[in-house]
Amino acid sequence: MPQVYEKTAKELVREEIISILQEKPEFSREELIQRISAKYPDLKRPSLTTVLAFYTTNAKARVNYGTPDDTADLLFQVDGLHFRAYQSGVDPVPIRKQSTAVTEHSPAFEKDVRTLIADNLTVIHPNLKLYDKDGKSGLEYPIQGYFIDILGLQQSGKGEDLVVVEVKLKPSDRIVGQLARYLTLVEQHIAQKGQKVQGVVVCREIAEEVLLALTRLGVSVYRYSMSIVMEKQAFPVHVEKQVA
């Protein structure tokens, strides 16, 4: 992100985080952003949410914007909107780097599945494609401080529908609130007048009560399965042709 003040955006946000924590034990994302925007109006909201994630110890996205060390361990995200000071020895160990171990239950595995689905959206619907406008890819699409797994466009009889796709191994009931939030944000900030917004969950398995709640919300649910086919390769044998 370009530097428009004497200090970098990271330095300015860090100062404001320390300042607000001296005043209160907990604050909201919007409260911090408005406070910084009032002092530094040239800092754009996407940049602020990006730096906020960098200073949040339990934000997976923090590793996408540099290599955080202990000086960056300032915050712990309480829920989707609120933060407090990080407490060493009480809170989980801060996320420092992306996991390199790929198992079926690891974030890296889920990310690989997400990328695979994004590259093959027609398995969900033949007219579904990845959203790609204004230089933003629909894969891990940033919106108001959140990241949608996949944002797509689906051709329909009345134009193009926006499709929010979340990929989970086994979604809990928290996915219901998460989808509702994402659908609302897309309707408010991206959708044009009259443009329909749909929700889709892709998962390995799902509990019946979660499926019921998602169906009630009007969300389509797809289950995936994966297999690996192994084929032994023989070393080619070359036979020289003998000339009589």
Image (cartoon, rainbow, N blue to C red):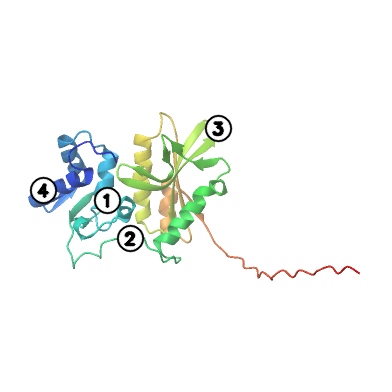
Mark 2, Cα crowd under 10 Å, few <14 / some 14-19 / many 20+, is some
Q: Identify the mark at residue 157; answer none if there is no mark.
A: 3
Quarter of the figure with residue 30: top left
* Residue under label 1: 53
The numbered mark, 2 or 3, whose residue comes first in the sequence reads: 2
Q: Nearer the viewer, mark 1 or mark 2?
A: 2
Whether residue 182 is visible here, answered yes or no, is yes
Q: CA distance from mark 2 to mark 3?
A: 45 Å
Q: Residue furthest left?
A: 23
Q: Amino acid at mark 2?
A: Lys
Q: Residue at x 11, y 48 (%)?
A: 19
Q: How far from the left and from the top, in percent, is residue 203?
A: 47, 57
Q: CA distance from mark 1 to mark 3?
A: 40 Å
Q: How far from the left and from the top, in percent, is residue 113?
A: 48, 56
The numbered mark, 3 or 4, whose residue comes first in the sequence reads: 4
Q: Answer yes or no: do the residues labelled 4 and 2 have beta carbons within 8 Å?
A: no
Whether residue 80 is visible here, answered yes or no, is no
Quarter of the figure with residue 172: bottom left
Q: Identify the mark at residue 97; answer none if there is no mark.
A: 2
Q: How far from the left and from the top, in percent, is residue 156?
A: 54, 35
As drawn, is 6 to the left or to the right of 132?
A: left
